């Protein structure tokens, strides 16, 4: 681990300022090291804040040149905490935050039907769907065409037209069914029609510029894309029936999604559910802003009541008919649970989002922590899952 570890010593404070001992911080970092040691992730970046203070901001591995399929003589670049990476589905949390900010300001109403903003969405049984339904994965149009996720996703207007023409899924309408790709485009189009500006413009205005983030954007317009960490398909081969379950849940194969994320258009397009690019410290600070009631470093982004509304449970824990597991959602976030949840044991107050496949970013009011765990290995099965769960357990226990 020593050869590939990169710290940001100026960013980290003494653990006591975050209410932990050095031994507790070391215990958490050792588990991150164990996760890297599974060899599933060519690179990991990790930031942990507690009581608003940065206790860990470090990285392991290589952002480029050391993954499956790379040439042995390829240039290897060490991952750092400030290396930007794609957040994939964690992008949904940011898109939802923009929606709630605009609701707070009166530019739109999340309780209104989608057709009030996009009249052509009315077709084929979708007239009663509200913005709140879309945010909480209860809108009933979770699937995306028979072809699945393809290069079509780079054409925002085309996807909106497809979704407007697409029929509601009667078997999931009103029930919980994760919208891996679809919901974000409809939310993005609502933002465009309500404000006259696209999601990226609203992101810059309300979040990125006020908080002084360098990356934190849909894609990486105007940036050197070669700096963004490369993603890889790793681990066990995805075979029947797991491959089919994954493709049903996220709309395509691992290989297709990784290939799409290597396409230059992925970083110029706006894909509201999938192509946010940011560094681990930026993501941790974003969740710290929410944890602090909508304010970070004296800059208010939204009202406390807005944060409470967007992180409140939207219905009880229910079986998600896309992810094929029990899930608990708010209007925009995946919520934790007790006795065991997405963010570890006894994390019912936690809110955040999972990104393809083991990117995990969240805030936990009970422990006063915000966490960003970014990585570049995409694998469904393997021994890393036990190690991953052990890391979450350790964070929950040491920060209790």
Image: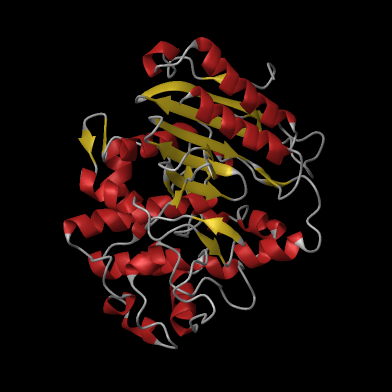
177 w.r.t. 381: above or below: below
Query: Which residue is located at x 74 percent, y 61 percent?
Result: 243
**Residue 36 on image: x %, y %:** 69, 30
The quadrant the C terminus occupies is top left
276 w.r.t. 31: above or below: below
- Residue projecting furthest to the bottom: 124
**Residue 320 on image: x %, y %:** 55, 63
Disc count in the image? 0
Q: Nearer the viewer, residue 210 or 393?
A: 393
79 w.r.t. 163: above or below: above
Q: What's the colour scheme?
A: secondary structure
Q: Is residue 63 visible?
A: no
Horizontal side of residue 352 vs 378, given as left or right: left
Q: Nearer the viewer, residue 3 or 245?
A: 245
**Residue 171 on image: x %, y %:** 54, 79
Question: Where is residue 49, by image quadrant?
Answer: top left
- Residue projecting furthest to the left: 106
Q: Nearer the viewer, residue 246 or 200?
A: 246
Query: Which residue is located at x 59 percent, y 19 percent?
Result: 27
The quadrant the N terminus occupies is top right
- Residue projecting furthest to the front: 339
Horizontal side of residue 58 vs 303, given as left or right: right
Q: Nearer the viewer, residue 37 or 27?
A: 27
Q: Is residue 347 visible?
A: yes
Horizontal side of residue 79 vs 362, given as left or right: right
Query: Which residue is located at x 28 percent, y 70 percent?
Result: 193
**Residue 318 on image: x %, y %:** 50, 61
204 w.r.t. 75: above or below: below
Question: Where is residue 209, by image quadrant?
Answer: top left
């Amino acid at each position: 681990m020593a050869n590939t570890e990169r710290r940001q010593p100026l960013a980290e404070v003494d653990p006591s300022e975050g209410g932990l001992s050095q031994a507790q911080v070391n215990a958490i970092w050792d588990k991150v090291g164990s996760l890297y040691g599974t060899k599933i992730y060519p690179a990991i970046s990790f930031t942990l804040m507690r009581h608003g203070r940065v206790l860990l901001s470090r990285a392991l591995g290589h952002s480029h040149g050391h993954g499956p399929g790379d040439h042995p003589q390829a240039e290897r670049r060490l991952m750092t905490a400030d290396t930007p990476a794609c957040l994939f589905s964690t992008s949904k949390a940011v898109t939802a935050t923009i929606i709630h900010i605009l609701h707070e300001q009166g530019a739109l109403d999340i309780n209104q039907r989608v057709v009030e903003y996009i009249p052509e969405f009315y077709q084929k049984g979708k007239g009663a769907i509200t913005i709140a339904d879309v945010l909480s994965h209860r809108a009933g149009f979770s699937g995306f065409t028979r072809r699945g996720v393809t290069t079509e996703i780079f054409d925002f207007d085309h996807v909106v037209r497809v979704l407007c023409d697409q029929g509601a899924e009667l078997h999931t309408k009103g029930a919980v069914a994760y919208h891996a790709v679809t919901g974000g485009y409809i939310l993005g189009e609502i933002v465009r029609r309500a404000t006259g500006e696209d999601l990226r413009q609203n992101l810059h205005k309300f979040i990125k510029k006020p908080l002084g983030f360098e990356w934190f954007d849909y894609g990486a317009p105007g940036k050197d894309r070669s700096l963004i960490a490369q993603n890889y398909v790793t681990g066990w081969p995805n075979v029947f029936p797991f491959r089919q379950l994954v493709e049903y849940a996220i709309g395509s194969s691992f290989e297709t999604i990784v290939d799409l994320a290597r396409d230059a258009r992925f970083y110029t397009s706006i894909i509201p559910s999938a192509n946010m690019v940011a560094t681990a410290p930026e993501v941790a600070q974003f969740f710290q802003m929410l944890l602090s009631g909508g304010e970070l470093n004296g800059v208010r982004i939204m009202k406390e009541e807005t944060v409470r509304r967007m992180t409140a449970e939207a219905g009880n824990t229910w079986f998600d008919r896309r992810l094929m597991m029990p899930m608990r959602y708010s209007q925009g976030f995946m919520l934790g649970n007790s006795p065991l949840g997405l963010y570890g044991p006894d994390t019912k107050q936690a809110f955040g989002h999972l990104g393809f496949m083991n990117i995990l970013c969240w805030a936990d009011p009970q422990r006063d922590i915000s966490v960003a765990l970014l990585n570049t290995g995409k694998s469904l099965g393997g021994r890393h899952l036990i190690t991953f769960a052990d890391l979450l357990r350790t964070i929950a226990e040491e920060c209790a």
